[in-house]
Amino acid sequence: MKGFRPGHVPPGLLLNRYLSGGAKVSKAIVERADHHWVHGRDQDPEQERLRELQVAILGCGSVGGPLARLLAQAGIGNLLLVDPESMDWPNVSRHELGVPSVGRFKAPELAREIEKAYPHLGRIYWRRERVGSGAKNLMAELLSCDLIISTMGNWSAENFLNDVQLETDGFPPILYGWVEPNAAAAHALLIPRGDSCLSCGINDKGRPYLAVTDWSNGGGSLQAPACGAQFTPYGPAELSWAHALLSETAINALNGEALIAHHRIWIGPRNRVYASGGSWSEAWTAEAGDPGSGGMIVERRWSASASCPACGRHVRSA
């Protein structure tokens, strides 16, 4: 037969077999599920680089947990999730994890959920160590990351992390994230090594010198029954602004758009702040202006401070 090749069945012969009751032909749908197609449908030129990057998230609670998923969805290929705590019932309403994870450690549970949802990504792994002088292996792992995000809300741990960055050549940039009472304002602070440091704007008790809101009622904290702990009754909608702010700031930093220490703040709606017993702080209004009705993002330079134990001597000698 002209044009016949061993192992090749001419299309006409296939049709004859089908019509005569032989082998049947069925349709198959083939869909792409590779990284470049899932993240941007081949139209995002940054994905080739993002898929190779490694980001550490320290603190996988109500801020860090959803943030980890957002970064996975954005195409960050490798995530190190660090948290020593387990999931508890009160976490469920404000966390990425749900009831099946109650009583289990947050970091491995979150890693499994992200791996299951996005199997095309690279390495999603976890550690249950506490950030501090006893976690030498963890600190060595952090050195290989492209960005560290801290949502721990623990001043001693973040102060230690700040000291390590100041003392270690080649230590990656750190993005600190926190929220004010009732999630009325959210903060994203990026500190590259060699610029100012965390202590330039945080006092020795871990409180920022400049807050957007002021709370004469203590921030609306309530006493949790039977356990002696306190909590503030805000929900996931209020927290979503913090997740968006931090994920955007992280992607910008990974794309090389942020080369200096800077501070981004989401300011919530005025009516919600005042209805919860808060107000705009006098210090914020004096330095940055009256936020008015709120609902905005403000960006400011995080400058080295003359009173900072680490950076002050450089400022005074300049």
Image: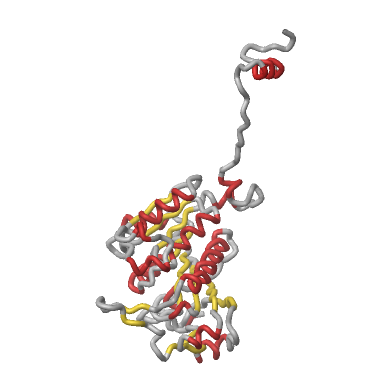
Q: Residue at x 55, y 61 (%)?
A: 251
The image's colour scheme reads secondary structure
Instruction: Pick the residue in front: 63 or 220.
Output: 220
**Of all residues shown, which one is farthest toward the top?**
1
Q: Residue at x 53, y 74 (%)?
A: 263
- The reply, left or right, for residue 313 in relation to residue 139 is right
- The residue sitting at 50% across, 85% down in the picture is 273
Residue beneath the point at 36% across and 78% down: 231
Q: Is residue 9 visible?
A: no
**Which quarter of the rendered picture does the N terminus lie within?**
top right
In this picture, residue 115 sits left or right of residue 257: left
Foreground: 14 or 223? Answer: 14
Is 243 located above or below residue 234 in the figure? above
Tell me which corner region of the image, top left, top right, bottom left or bottom right, holds residue 221.
bottom left
- Residue 181 vs 246, above or below: the answer is below
Q: How many marks?
A: 0
Residue 298 visible (yes or no): yes
Image coordinates of residue 268 in percent, x first then y, are 54, 79
Q: Quadrant of residue 148?
A: bottom left
- Report x, y in % for residue 107: 36, 57
Q: Position of residue 301 (x, y in %)?
A: 55, 76
- Relative horizontal placement of residue 132, taking residue 41 as reference (left or right): left
How far from the left and from the top, in percent, is residue 204? 36, 81
